[in-house]
């Protein structure tokens, strides 16, 4: 395959996408600005990306950067499955003419990539250590989670741009109704209504006036008190909730996808340490992960979910239809729910909260993926490329959410929708996706482990087997775990007596 032709075709695709956007939603750009962005001299920075939702942001940023610096930037979309491999091949040589070095005008100068691919990119020469000329790569600008995500072997090799993590979703309409009923009962008005019914049956005059209203502040305060802080709280709620007819499940999430399950063991399982790149920091099989996975397994007694039938989209659809009270979703759900409300396909108010802890003693921790802007080690314009990377992650990042529906990894971005700010709190506490190539099979095996645990297999054996597989893969030698005698697990960590009914 001729990779020069590949790069050219990809660039043409980018131009077509930008053209479509200009004709549609980006009418604020002048015709002159648009022509200047995609045409002109070859002395240009090329930024590659693989997520179409980033097109408007990158195109808009390129125009703003041209106005600010006079430097032209051309966004290039490459949506193929072998994204990094394509960047590598275009950067190194033309396969049909190996004697000819890569054309500098075709090499991606910088690109967007998920943090779990950074080891592969760095070892392949496709990423270099950030010089950070603007001194923005610090905990004053970014949470430690974001900096850990883009760190490899002690070097920061990318600028954090956006993130995705799990958050807790709840039907605020249902909680609001329950809050009103609780306040009504506490005020004695519910009792008065009951007494009135009895008196009416005795042909005695009753008070038919409406009960006094509660202020919005009182109702909101009670709703906030009702948002579960632990899984125990959810189970207690399920036992007390007088569910409307439409409700099919108090709690439902995509139990078939490890991204939505990881929170249950995230605080106690380590694969690569804080930066996900240290083969000496692997802890999969321990007392805490065994306890945590048993809690997950026991949840199937109360929230029976078919792993073969459930999908993320089906869960979100059921929530919009009022069939679910609580769920675990990713940050993209916020924009989807807002869109559904605007279109009139979701009549319920919703809220976003931190993922509940397991109980008062055992904590949870979500998984997160950070998208970084990385400078290509084969670019001949590395200094200019890094300046634009910093511009995307710092100066222009306030435009990111409005143009892509992706929350920024930077700390001080304020969103009109407060729910996105809550998601940042979950991100700050999350575990960055590990970047070790040696543990590449970990996610497939972990997902199988969770599926089998959900279906009732022995949790201790499953985690022991998982650890042995990963450690054998990482060390290159057969690894045998020492069997862990489990500590006594107090059953009411999960349920009160009678809750199963």
Image (cartoon, rainbow, N blue to C red):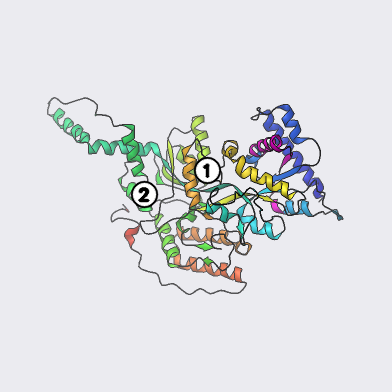
Question: Where residue 345 sits: x, y (%)?
Answer: 49, 32
Q: Are marks 1 and 2 in contact (CB under 8 Å)?
A: no
Tell me the CA gap for discs 1 and 2.
32 Å
Element type at mark 2: helix
Task: Specify whether 74 is left or right of 394.
Answer: right
Would you call the spot at circle 1 few (<14 residues within 10 Å), some (14-19), or many (20 or more)?
Answer: few
| Sequence-wise first label, 1 or 2 | 2
Residue 153: say if magenta: no
Q: Does residue 420 sit above or below 192 in this rendering?
A: below
Looking at this view, is 416 or 95 the one in front? 416
Question: Where residue 335 sits: x, y (%)?
Answer: 53, 38
Looking at this view, is 216 or 82 the one in front? 216
Q: Quadrant of residue 224?
A: top left
Would you call the spot at circle 2 few (<14 residues within 10 Å), some (14-19), or many (20 or more)?
Answer: many
Task: Specify whether 369 is left or right of 94.
Answer: left
Residue at (51, 73) in percent of width and height = 481
Question: Where residue 57 sits: x, y (%)?
Answer: 63, 38
Range of residues picked out in magenta:
56-84
Question: Where residue 130 sits: x, y (%)?
Answer: 66, 53
Looking at this view, is 206 or 411 the one in front? 411
Q: Which residue is mark 1?
A: 412
Q: Which mark is residue 234?
A: 2
Of badges 1 and 2, the one in the foreground is: 1
Q: Which mark is residue 77?
A: none
Q: Quadrant of residue 220?
A: top left
Q: Is residue 245 visible?
A: no
Element type at mark 1: loop
Residue at (62, 64) in percent of width and height = 438
């Amino acid at each position: 395959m001729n990779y020069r032709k590949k790069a050219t075709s990809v660039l043409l695709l980018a131009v077509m996408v930008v053209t479509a956007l200009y004709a549609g939603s980006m009418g604020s750009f002048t015709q002159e600005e648009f022509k200047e962005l995609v045409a002109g001299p070859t002395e240009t920075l090329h930024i590659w990306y693989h997520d179409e939702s980033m097109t408007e942001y990158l195109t808009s940023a390129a125009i703003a950067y041209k106005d600010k610096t006079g430097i032209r930037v051309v966004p290039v979309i490459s949506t193929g499955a072998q994204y990094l491999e394509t960047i590598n091949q275009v950067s190194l040589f033309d396969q049909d003419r190996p004697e000819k070095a890569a054309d500098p005008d075709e090499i991606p100068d910088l690109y967007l990539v998920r943090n779990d691919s950074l080891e592969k990119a760095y070892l392949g020469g496709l990423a270099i250590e950030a010089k950070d000329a603007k001194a923005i790569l610090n905990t004053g600008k970014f949470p430690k989670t974001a900096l850990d995500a883009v760190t490899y072997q002690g070097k920061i090799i990318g600028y954090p741009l956006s993130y995705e993590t799990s958050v807790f979703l709840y039907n605020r309409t249902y909680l609001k109704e329950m809050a009103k009923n609780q306040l009504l009962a506490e005020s004695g008005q519910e009792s008065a209504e009951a007494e009135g019914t009895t008196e009416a049956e005795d042909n005695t005059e009753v008070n038919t006036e409406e009960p006094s209203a509660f202020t919005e502040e009182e109702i909101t305060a009670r709703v906030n008190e009702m948002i579960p802080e632990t899984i125990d709280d959810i189970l207690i709620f399920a036992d007390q909730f007088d569910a409307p007819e439409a409700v099919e499940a108090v709690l439902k999430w995509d139990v078939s996808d490890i991204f939505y399950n990881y929170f249950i063991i995230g605080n106690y399982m380590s694969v690569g340490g804080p930066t996900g790149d240290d083969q000496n920091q692997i802890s999969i099989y321990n007392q805490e992960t065994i306890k945590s996975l048993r809690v997950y397994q026991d949840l199937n007694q109360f929230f029976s979910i078919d792993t073969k039938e459930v999908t993320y989209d089906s869960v979100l659809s059921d929530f919009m239809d009022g069939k679910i009270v609580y769920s675990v979703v990713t940050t993209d759900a916020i924009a989807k729910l807002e869109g559904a409300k605007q279109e009139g396909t979701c009549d319920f108010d919703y809220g976003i909260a931190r993922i509940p802890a397991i109980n008062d003693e055992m904590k949870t921790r979500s998984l997160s993926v950070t998208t970084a802007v990385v400078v290509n080690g084969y670019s001949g314009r590395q200094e200019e490329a890094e300046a634009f990377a910093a511009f995307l992650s710092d100066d222009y990042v306030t435009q990111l959410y409005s143009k892509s529906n992706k929350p920024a990894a930077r700390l001080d971005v304020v969103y009109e929708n407060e729910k996105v700010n809550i998601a940042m709190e979950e991100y700050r506490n999350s575990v960055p996706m590990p970047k070790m190539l040696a543990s590449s099979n970990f996610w497939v095996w972990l997902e199988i482990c969770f599926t089998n645990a959900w279906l009732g297999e022995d949790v201790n054996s499953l985690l022991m087997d998982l650890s042995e597989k990963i450690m054998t893969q990482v060390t290159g030698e057969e690894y045998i775990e020492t069997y862990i005698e489990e500590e006594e697990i107090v059953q009411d960590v999960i349920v009160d007596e009678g809750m199963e009914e």
